[in-house]
Every structure is written in C-alpha cells, then in structure tokens.
C-alpha cells in the first residue's frame, strides 16, 4: 500500500462518494489498489481505488 490509498487499512470506516445509500463501510483489505469494503446496506464490494476515491470517515 502506498500513496493516497495507504490510509485505507483493514478496519477503516469509509463511505462511497457516488453511493451514499450503501451506508458506512468497513475496509476488509487493501491489495494493489483493490479495496474490499463491507457496506451496511450493500454488503461486500471490491472497489478499484484507481477509479473511485473512497471518503475516509474514521480509523477503528
């Protein structure tokens, strides 16, 4: 992990900027700019961090 996505470690709470209805998400993993997030209302999603800039909420 490096650069702007290094902050998204497992346990970090995030929101998807284009999908607010998904609710709060918790990062499960961050491997090669592919961030797996478990969202409250959408479940597990793999986010391409080169395409989507997740919004940092807090570190747990």
Image (cartoon, rainbow, N blue to C red):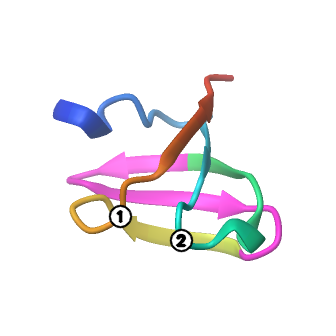
The residue that label 1 is drawn on is 52
Relative side of 16 to 46, left or right: right
Residue 24 point in image, percent of width and height: 74, 52
58 relative to 46, above or below = above
Question: Which label belongs to residue 18?
Answer: 2
Q: Residue at x 20, y 53 (%)?
A: 32
Residue 35 point in image, percent of width and height: 40, 56
Q: Residue at x 46, y 33 (%)?
A: 9
Relative side of 55 to 35, left or right: right
Question: Which label belongs to residue 25?
Answer: none
Q: Tell me where the magenta segment starts and ends, as one range.
A: 28-42
Q: Quadrant of the C terminus?
A: top right
Q: CA distance from mark 1 to mark 2?
A: 9 Å
The answer to whether residue 40 of the structure is visible from this angle is yes
Residue in front for this viewpoint, 18 or 39? 18
Q: Residue at x 17, y 32 (%)?
A: 3
Dot 1 or dot 2: first in sequence order is: 2
Q: Quadrant of the N terminus?
A: top left
């Amino acid at each position: 992990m490096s650069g702007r996505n290094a902050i998204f470690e497992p346990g970090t709470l995030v929101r998807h900027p284009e999908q607010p209805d998904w609710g709060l998400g918790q990062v499960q993993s961050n491997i090669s700019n592919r961030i797996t997030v478990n969202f409250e209302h959408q479940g597990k999603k793999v986010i391409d961090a080169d395409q989507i800039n997740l919004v940092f909420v807090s570190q747990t």
